[in-house]
């Protein structure tokens, strides 16, 4: 009898493991739930209403306006995301967000900071330039306007007055100069800034070697974040690495490496009435199951960067969820090595034809990923031009191209991928490649080995990595993740590519930007400088008590001061 | 067992001959001093091995840091200055001596990646791992040993069968699976415990202990089961010895036979098993720390190796090695206490 009882207990535990409880979500009445919450999304189909890139992603047709009229500077900044009519933001409460990664260290943005972690700085530190959900640059942060010189060789920023850093010192032109002087020599993308002039207390002029239409993009992200000079000068490296003294709506209260970030309300924030929250806490949770259970048990109000596979179930349970375009997944080859099969364009074409991207997107994206028809995301300016020459799944054509290139029986190769790629997906890709005769040995090197391969090169193989989609600017995406032998040693960077990239970066008006961006996309596609696979998603889930615009952007931005919680 | 000689006058000695321990206090002191000196040599060898091994891994920490921080605009001179700042431009032998000199002064080095003293972070995490490890060890002893004894004494009964079955499950069950089950039951269904995290005792004692429950259960499960199995096995072997049969036939009390005469002789393998478990006290369990999102030593070490963070890897391994060496010395001493046949020579 006792044995039977024991078996029953075990069985119940197993059942418990196989089913996820559906605790009562802290949600509003069903009428306010997302549409999709009443319609369960199918795993292989897009959960229509839960993913609304049309409303939250930057529109591909809208080019950033580098020559934004100074008139904008005279207009009072609008909140990026105004509360719905009749809804008054409540004050108080702490927003707790579960995330996969946190900056380590946090403070030394001037000398040592992983750009992908900028998002977590924004509660405490603000950039010069703001971003609207549609990807336009707006003067709602530390700059209230900017003016580009007619020859494009300078950009003058008017700074917000009456702003103080958390240490009580003034934010002014000297502070901007200090910050930009510290970073412009260390970061290749800022080399275009030759000097920074203080025009007056609240006016600063950036002198440029050439006009670059990505400069506003750079200054809206980690390169534009302003830190109190007084908080850095004379301090030890350790102090700088663990403190952030900015102008943001929250102040850094506690930093525990790879554990948590705790921000507390900045009562002297320049935008009166904000922030609404008492604080924001980020908790790092590496395991997705743990994150899910912690979120469901109420240990956090929001869970950012969850795996797409978790989204349908959470929607069913009535939680609010939003998906924006995440990283593009692209493959770099060792095209620089003359003895590598990938030095031949036909082989690179064949590689793309061999993989059924749609099947992978359906199987692993749970309706939130998209096939990359060209070497860009559809949110990138001019990406539509790639559709005409998209290389579709066609194993027969892949075999034919391989034969043309002198590999009728295929070849053996190494396939490297970053650690976050699902093993099952690698197995699927391996099977597709095998079908056309390519024997791929799959591996996911650790961080140090992977970086070393990037920097020192690899032989006869490919690297699956990311392409940023955080801005409509394709030029900015390529400046970050495009062909660059300083970052990807084995991949060829033709002179023509460098020339087109420079032309696209120098384009001043919207029409030229679009035309040059399209030319760049077409060239990258024709030369198969990298092989595009698909665009993943960035998904955030939160309870209905949460009101924020974390869901309005891709990885680029958010406005913590606007966030609030229902009591 | 190194440094010990086992002198046995007969295959199995009767514990009733109390005059034959052959142990003098001075022997023990000499032995401990010798083992401590040996430990210093072991630690030096370990430190040299780790120092060289981490440098054999592909990659250059300065280049990695520059790449990950997107500092692609740095000039060669700026890169050389960075390398000089961390002493990575010196010959290997000098780098090692510099590091060793720092260690002797309590400085384990500065991380290239975080720019902070690694000792600070290690000693922030060490108490967390240590506490979980200590509770797990205690739980293992308190549950594993008595359960093993009961199982051996009640051999063939339903209790024995239950213990054998559960201990088999215990040594085979994956920790991450158990962690998820515990979360579902205790956090989501019963809502008794938080899913994850670690709160210092000084901050919130209630939450501190609540957050410890599931990690400690997961960390201790294997050693509870292993100890129970080992204790049962050892006890069964001893219980079949002639002197135990003699004790039973003399009509001695059961408790006296088990705890006074049988248990001590059956403890040697149990102590060995316990020693192996004890190493987790400082090394931590990466799986448990990841599942319950605990900032412990296990995750720190994995992250350090992955990033090729020399200072962290060297510092963490040195501390783990020192602890393991200390535990080994302790275990060797306990061997002598548990089994007088083992003499210090």
Image (cartoon, rainbow, N blue to C red):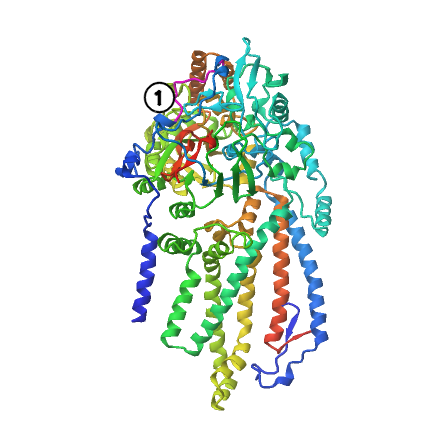
Q: Name the main secondary structure of what is drawn in magenta.
A: loop
Residue that carries the numbered disc 1 in the rendered image: A387
The answer to whether residue B291 is above or below residue A221 is below
Q: Give how far across and how far down residue B214 sits, in percent.
A: 45, 57
Toward the top, the furthest residue is A150
Asked if one can make out residue A69 in the rendered structure from this viewpoint, the answer is no
**Residue nearer the viewer, A265 or A185:** A265
Toward the left, the furthest residue is A39
- Residue at the location (48% across, 59% down)? B216
Query: Which contiguous range is marked in magenta?
Result: A57-67
Instruction: Quarter of the image for the C terminus of chain A: give it.
Output: top left
Element at badge 1?
Answer: helix
Instruction: Quarter of the image for the N terminus of chain A: give it.
Output: bottom left
**Residue nearer the viewer, B56 or B311:** B311
Q: Chain of mark 1?
A: A
The answer to whether residue A382 is above or below residue A405 is above
Q: Is residue A64 magenta?
A: yes
Q: Give how far across and how far down residue A334 sits, in percent.
A: 50, 30
Q: Give how far across and how far down residue A460 sits, in percent.
A: 49, 34
Disc 1 packing (10 Å; few <14; some 14–19; many ≥20): few
- Residue at the location (40% across, 63% down)? B169
Q: Judge from the rendering whether residue A376 lies leftward or rightward of residue B1; answer left or right.
A: left
**Residue nearer the viewer, B202 or B187:** B202
Classify residue A392 by image quadrant: top left
Q: Is residue B72 magenta?
A: no
Classify residue B128 by image quadrant: bottom right
Q: Give how far across and how far down residue A382 sits, in percent.
A: 40, 18
Asked if one can make out residue B131 in the rendered structure from this viewpoint, the answer is yes
């Amino acid at each position: 009898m006792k044995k039977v009882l024991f078996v029953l207990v075990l069985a119940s535990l197993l059942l418990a493991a196989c089913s996820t409880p559906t605790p009562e979500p802290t949600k509003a009445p069903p009428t306010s739930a997302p549409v999709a919450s009443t319609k369960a999304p199918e795993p292989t189909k897009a959960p229509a209403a839960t993913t609304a890139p049309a409303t939250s992603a930057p529109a591909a047709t809208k080019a950033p306006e580098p020559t934004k009229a100074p008139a904008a500077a005279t207009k009072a900044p609008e909140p990026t995301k105004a509360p719905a009519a009749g809804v008054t933001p409540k004050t108080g409460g702490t927003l707790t967000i579960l995330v996969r990664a946190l900056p380590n260290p946090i403070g030394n943005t001037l000398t040592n900071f992983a750009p992908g972690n900028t998002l977590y700085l924004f509660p405490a530190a603000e950039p010069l330039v703001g971003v609207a959900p549609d990807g336009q640059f707006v003067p709602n942060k530390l700059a209230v306007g900017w003016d580009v010189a007619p020859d494009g060789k300078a950009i003058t920023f008017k700074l917000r007055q009456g702003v103080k850093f958390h240490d009580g010192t003034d934010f002014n032109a000297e502070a901007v100069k200090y910050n930009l002087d510290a970073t412009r020599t260390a970061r290749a993308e800022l080399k275009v800034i030759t000097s920074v002039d203080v025009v007056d207390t609240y006016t600063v002029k950036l002198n440029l070697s050439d006009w670059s239409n990505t400069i506003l993009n750079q200054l809206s992200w980690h390169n534009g974040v302003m830190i109190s000079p007084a908080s850095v000068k004379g301090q030890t490296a350790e102090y700088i690495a663990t403190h952030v003294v900015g102008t943001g709506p929250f102040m850094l209260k506690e930093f525990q490496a790879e554990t948590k970030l705790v921000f507390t309300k900045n009562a002297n924030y320049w935008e009166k009435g904000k922030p609404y929250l008492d604080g924001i806490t980020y908790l790092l949770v590496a395991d997705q199951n743990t994150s899910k259970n912690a979120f469901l048990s109420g240990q956090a109000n929001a869970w950012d960067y969850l795996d797409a596979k978790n989204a349908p179930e959470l929607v069913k349970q009535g939680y609010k969820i939003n998906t924006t375009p995440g990283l593009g997944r692209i493959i770099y080859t060792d095209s620089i090595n003359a003895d590598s099969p990938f030095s031949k364009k036909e082989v690179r074409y064949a590689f793309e034809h061999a993989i059924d991207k749609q099947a992978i997107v359906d199987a692993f994206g749970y309706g939130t990923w998209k096939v990359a028809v060209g070497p860009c995301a559809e949110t990138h300016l001019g990406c539509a031009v790639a559709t005409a020459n998209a290389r579709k799944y066609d194993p027969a054509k892949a075999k034919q191209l391989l034969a043309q290139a002198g590999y009728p029986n295929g070849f053996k190769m190494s396939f490297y991928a970053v650690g976050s790629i699902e093993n099952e997906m690698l197995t699927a890709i391996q099977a597709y490649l095998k079908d056309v005769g390519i024997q791929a040995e799959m591996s996911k090197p650790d961080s140090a080995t992977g970086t070393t391969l990037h920097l020192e090169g690899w032989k006869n193989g490919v690297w699956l990595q990311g392409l940023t989609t955080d801005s409509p600017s394709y030029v900015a995406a390529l400046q970050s993740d495009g062909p660059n032998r300083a970052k990807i040693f084995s991949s060829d960077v033709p002179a023509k590519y460098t020339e087109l990239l420079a032309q696209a970066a120098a384009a001043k008006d919207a029409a030229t930007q679009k035309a040059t961006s399209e030319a760049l996309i077409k060239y990258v596609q024709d030369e198969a400088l990298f092989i595009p696979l698909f665009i993943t998603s960035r998904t955030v889930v939160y309870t209905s008590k949460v009101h924020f615009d974390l869901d309005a952007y891709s990885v680029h931005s958010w406005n913590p001061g606007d966030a609030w919680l229902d009591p | 067992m190194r440094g010990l000689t086992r002198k046995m006058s007969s295959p199995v000695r009767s514990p009733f001959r109390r005059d034959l321990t052959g142990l003098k206090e001075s022997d023990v002191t000499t032995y401990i001093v010798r083992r401590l000196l040996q430990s210093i040599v072991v630690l030096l060898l370990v430190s040299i091995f780790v120092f060289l091994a981490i440098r054999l891994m592909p990659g250059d920490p300065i280049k990695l840091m520059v790449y990950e921080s997107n500092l692609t605009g740095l000039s060669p001179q700026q890169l050389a200055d960075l390398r000089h700042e961390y002493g990575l431009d010196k010959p290997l032998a000098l780098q090692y001596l510099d590091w060793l000199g720092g260690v002797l002064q309590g400085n384990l080095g500065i991380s290239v990646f975080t720019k902070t003293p690694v000792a600070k972070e290690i000693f922030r995490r060490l108490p967390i791992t240590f506490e979980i490890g200590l509770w797990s060890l205690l739980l293992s002893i308190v549950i594993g040993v008595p359960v093993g004894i009961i199982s051996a004494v009640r051999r063939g009964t339903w209790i024995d069968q239950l213990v054998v079955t559960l201990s088999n499950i215990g040594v085979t069950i994956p920790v991450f699976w158990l962690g998820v089950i515990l979360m579902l039951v205790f956090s989501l269904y019963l809502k008794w415990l938080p899913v994850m995290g670690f709160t210092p005792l000084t901050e919130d004692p209630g939450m501190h202990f609540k957050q410890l429950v599931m990690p400690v259960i997961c960390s201790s499960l294997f050693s509870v089961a292993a100890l129970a199995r080992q204790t049962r096995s050892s006890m069964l072997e001893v219980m079949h010895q002639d002197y135990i049969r003699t004790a039973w036939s003399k009509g001695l009390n059961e408790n006296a036979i088990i705890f006074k005469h049988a248990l001590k002789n059956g403890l040697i393998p149990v102590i060995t098993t316990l020693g192996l478990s004890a190493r987790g006290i400082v090394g931590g369990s990466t799986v448990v720390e990841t599942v319950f999102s605990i900032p412990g030593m296990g995750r720190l070490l994995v992250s350090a190796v992955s990033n090729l963070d020399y200072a962290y890897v060297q510092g963490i391994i040195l501390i783990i090695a020192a602890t393991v060496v200390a535990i080994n010395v302790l275990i060797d001493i306990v061997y002598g206490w548990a089994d007088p046949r083992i003499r210090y020579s």
